[in-house]
Image (cartoon, rainbow, N blue to C red):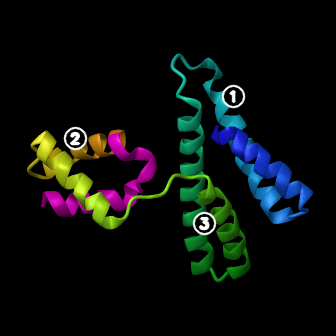
Amino acid sequence: MLREKIQSETVAAMKAKDKERTAALRLIGAKIKDRDIELRTADKKPEDDELVTDVLMKMAKQRKESIAMYEDGGRQELADKEKAELLVIEEFLPQQMSEEETRAAIAQIKADTGAEGMKDMGKVMGELKARHGATLDMSKASGLVKEALS
């Protein structure tokens, strides 16, 4: 489903002669194909939309890190290019949970698992990723889990 949407958006961007968007969409397509090739030998293959979402989340994370590094290094033109790619990538990602929703999810998991201290952080993070992996920024969630467990 998501894969087809990315393909149709690529075609639409090419027809509209939008070079930057076309390049970003082709990059997404290439990363998805790379992941397909990696998984050819795997015993257990994830659901297609799950695989595409995972690839998109990794790409978004890379872009965010690159933007921060480019801005620190004074390379605003490269940071702007990365921001444009990030906007295209985020179009296909599910809506991310707000901080309040994340805190509520953490509180629910904490109650469900009986987590009390920092020693239970791995258990809480694992359950959080299992329940809300695609709609949650795990790096931000990590800080909130530490805060909740301390």
Q: Is 111 on the left-hand or right-hand side of 27?
A: left
Please say if 18 is above or below 47.
below
Q: Amino acid at mark 2?
A: Lys
Q: Nearer the viewer, mark 3 or mark 2?
A: 2
The mark total stands at 3
Please say if 141 is above or below 127.
below
Q: Residue at x 35, y 39 (%)?
A: 130
Mark 3 and mark 2 residues within 8 Å of each other at the beta carbon: no
Residue 100, image x, y percentages: 29, 65
Q: Is 27 on the left-hand or right-hand side of 57?
A: right
Q: Residue at x 23, y 45 (%)?
A: 124
Please name the predominant secondary structure of the magenta segment in the image: helix
Q: Residue at x 91, y 56 (%)?
A: 15
Residue under label 3: 66
Q: Amino acid at mark 1?
A: Ile
Residue stretch in magenta: 131-150
> SS for tag 1?
helix
* C-alpha gap between disc 2 and disc 1: 32 Å
Q: Is residue 141 magenta?
A: yes
Who is closer to the viewer here, 137 or 40?
137
Q: Is 63 on the left-hand or right-hand side of 116?
A: right
Q: Residue at x 78, y 46 (%)?
A: 8
Residue under label 2: 123
Dot placed on the residue nearer the N-terminal end, 3 or 2: 3
Residue under label 1: 37
